[in-house]
Amino acid sequence: MTDISASTARPSYNWRVVDIVVAALIAVAGGVIFWAWSQGANLISAPANAVYPPLTGLYIGGWLIPAVLGMLIIRKPGAALFCETVAATGELIMGSQYGTTVLISGVLQGLGAELVFAAFLYKRFNLTTALLAGAGAGLFGGLNDCFSPWGWNIAYPATDKLVYIIFCAISGAIIAGALSWIATRGLAKTGVLSSFASRKAATEPAFS
Amino acid sequence: MGAADTGVRPAAVTAQGWGWRHAGRTQPAVRGLDLDIRPGERVLLLGPSGSGKSTLLHALAGVLGGEEDDADETGSLLVDGAAPRSRRGRAGLMQQDPETQVVLSRLGDDVAFGAENLAVPRDEIWTRVHEALEDVGLGHLPLNHPTSALSGGQKQRLALAGILAMRPGLILLDEPTANLDPAGVLEVRDAVGRCLDKTGATLIVVEHRVAVWKNMVDRIVVLQPGSSGQDAVFLDGPPDRVLEQARKMLIAAGVWVPGYVPPTRSRLDEQNSSRLLLSAQDLAVSRETPRRRGFRTIAPEPVQVGIEAEVRAGQALTVTGPNGAGKSTFALTLAGLLKPVDGTVTASNDLSDGGGPDPYSWKADRLISRIGTVFQEPEHQFVTAKVLDELMFGPRHLGRGSERVDELLERLRLGKLVDANPYTLSGGEKRRLSVATVLAAHPKVLVLDEPTFGQDAATWAELASFLSELLDEGTAVVSVTHDQEFSAVLGGTELRLGPSEPATARTEAGAA
Amino acid sequence: MRQELTLHGNTALLTRANPLAKFVAVFLISMVLALSIDWVSASVALLAELALFPLAGLTLRLVWQRGWPLILAAALGGWSTAILSADSGSVLLDVGVWSISEGSLTLGLGFMLRGLAIAMPAVLLMSCTDPTDLADALAQKARLPHRFVLGTLAALRLVGLMAEEWQTIGMARRARGVGSHGNPMQRLRATLGQSFGLLVQAIRRASRLAVTMEARGFGGNTRTWARESTYSVLDIWVVLGGVLIAASAVLSAVSAGTWSFVWLSRN
């Protein structure tokens, strides 16, 4: 307890209990928000599905929020992967139309975001990184939906698959990336992030 | 104190010039704390908000600081001569919010959790679990009883059982009863008393309602804020002496000193036959929305049925009753926020002003200028990132000016906070802000859900006085409360809801 | 779907099996079914699953009450496949961008049944598995790090509370004049604000819960388990059952000549 030596401000990569619990509850809350959100959005998604199914890719970003938001707040390696996997587990418990394959989707989507943060060596948590991470999660999610055997769009023709994947990436970047970044700044201002490195998020520049 | 047969060795606490600054803060939460607590002593910790009471308890529980935290520690704080972080399990901590004092979803598992973490052998764990549940009075429940089905008071007693199963020598209670109704408060206090008598463990409790703990402790320590530049301990000694010597300071700090009810403004006159604004007829209420089961829609099971009530201009209506009787649910239904399961809520023409008789069907901006509702948790109602925007939100929506806001800022002492983020305010400030934001829309009926819960004496008195003033100006005030002193200040009538027995619930009305 | 699928007080046979064994069986069925889009393998598996429901304490009525959104979703998935996939055989319907042919309809139908056959065993799994037992098994048997498993379990316990809080925040914001009515843009903004409110409460609660857990000694490397997660003979039967269902689905599809491997199923 005497030797805290915060002189070198190098972030620790070890997960504390508070990191684990907050990350998991972000994923859980994300699930609740998305569940409530999809009640209303069925009005939009059902016609989209009926008219041109690849349009539903634009909607995937909502599922990806835990991955990006979790990492922006916790700032520890594995946060994106962990949060998205927990969110998928939550979905499985609530009853998922994808069955147990929702877990694989969750892991892959989380991995897409995680790889982007890792490419920045877990040192950049600005808007650019958030957008890229969201797009990465969307890309992996789209690929999973189109090419893995359990993917729901496996039977689509190639052009539709391509369109769907692009829509997923865009949706991931905007909904999961930009919204999570804005939310993190808002949260930092409320003081609830005081025990995380992200407590300074509100004063960090958007780029650089 | 029969500590011998319980396997508990009471812990000693020593602090020498101890201080702590949280990460990201400029001022220390605690500065220069010198304190010696002998094994088995029972100490009540008092002080104004910001005097670092919770910080001290967290430090003693060994949950403060960590590798990367750029927090600052000075001096030394020891439990049994060692750093608390290295002595996990020597201290057990109970916090305020019952929901987060429960870890697992089965009763038995939750009690076992701490013992498991201390690597206690399996058979020994279950012996401890049974004993601890007996000690806190939950022994009659099955081990797989869902913890989510417990009341607030039961959840806190469960938390105590979880702590006892670790056999700690030091029990730390951080406002353990602030979120409970009066019955729950006694339930928890008495369980703590029994367990201390049995184990002889050292107790440190933080609580601003002194009367609850006064007779159980043998010492009171009063702290002052670390930002004051002074040493942490303001006064230390036997309860009666400290309460006498520090009375002025404690009253100023909003502590509920026994035998002292803060002065409040009294009502000028209570009109008895004023205009009817809002009424409930044969009302059945529930928080649940209708559920869809396949293609069918199923109406929710009401928590309370057959409620009759009248709300009149310039008069107070107090809603009381045991926990789970549906008091808040009734208030929210009356306020047009929940749809009645059965029966009706009717707004008179005086109130609706051409908007139709059913408040639930009103659009949000129509609603707020007629009925204002203050929720129990102020944070649920914050919609902006600045105090001033928060206050201007209603008037802007309604296309009104800021005169009312200026008046409220002044009246509720929020002037200095206009630029702050609402979430960063203190508990009392948040309460005052949430009342002010709702009143900024100038509603004729004000509905409050447990407005005095967990509030310090200063905020309490201010709120009660302010509401009595509003009543005299002709606003109707409906409050859900357990607080009899508060109801007494407001006067009016009391609506008492019986325990929730959906089929046969009765309601009795009487004078407060 | 507010309530979890898990039934409290369920005493059916499958509740006593180890969650890992159940998970392996269900996962196996899902993976094998995923390999082919055809109505035979899906129907066989689906029928076998329905036959198992009583063992998990489920009735068809309960499944319909709790699982109708999944059924709806599966139907929608079949629809999108039917209108999008390349046409083969005679065209049955052709309206602008939509066209449904015999081939695409068969594919769509197979897709729908397959979707159901993958979703249903998960419903079965969760209805007879307590998350606490699952966590015990994951930490003790699968050897996943217990800090992460138990931290997640504790957070998952708060899902009901979060759902309640979501509703309360919605009302509290209406009382401030933020309507859930209005045009889609206003509704979107209202939902985002409500989500932010919930996130703040989630992080506050999680931080307090973490303190509670740490104060009870959580976070160290060694711990004991009050309840041992064990395997029994039942678990062998559970896994064998999974293998059996998967195998009979594949065999019947192959012998009926409908088996079509996903990556080659471009007719």
Image (spheres, coloured by chain):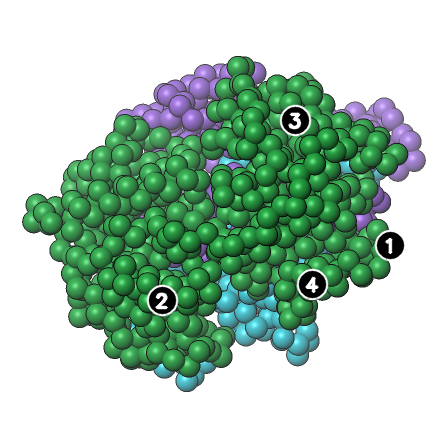
Chain colours: A cyan, B green, C purple
Q: Earlier in the sequence, mark 1 or mark 3?
A: 3
Residues under labels 3 and 2: Cα distance? 45 Å
A78 relative position to C12: left or right? right
A153 relative position to C222: left or right? right
**Host chain of mark 4:** B
- For disc 1, the neighbor class at 10 Å (few under 14, some 14 to 19, many from 20) is few
Q: Is residue B19 positioned above or below C156 on the image?
A: below
Q: Residue type at mark 1?
A: Gly
Q: Residue type at mark 3?
A: Ala
Residue at point 49%, 55% (across, down): B262
- Total number of numbered discs in the rendering: 4
Q: Are marks 1 and 3 on the same chain?
A: yes
Mark 4 sits on what residue? B409
- Between circles 4 and 1, the one closer to the viewer is 4
Residue at point 39%, 47% (across, down): B177
**Host chain of mark 2:** B
Q: Earlier in the sequence, mark 3 or mark 2?
A: 2
Comparing B407 with B65, the one in front is B407
Residues under labels 1 and 2: Cα distance? 49 Å
Question: Is residue B255 at least partly visible in the picture?
Answer: yes
Q: Are marks 3 and 4 on the same chain?
A: yes
Q: Earlier in the sequence, mark 2 or mark 4?
A: 2
Which disc is residue B246 wearing? Answer: 2
- C-beta proximity under 8 Å, tags 1 and 3: no
Residue at point 68%, 73% (across, down): A206
Q: Is residue B473 positioned above or below B495 on the image?
A: below
Mark 3 sits on what residue? B309
Q: Earlier in the sequence, mark 1 or mark 2?
A: 2
Which disc is residue B399 wearing? Answer: 1
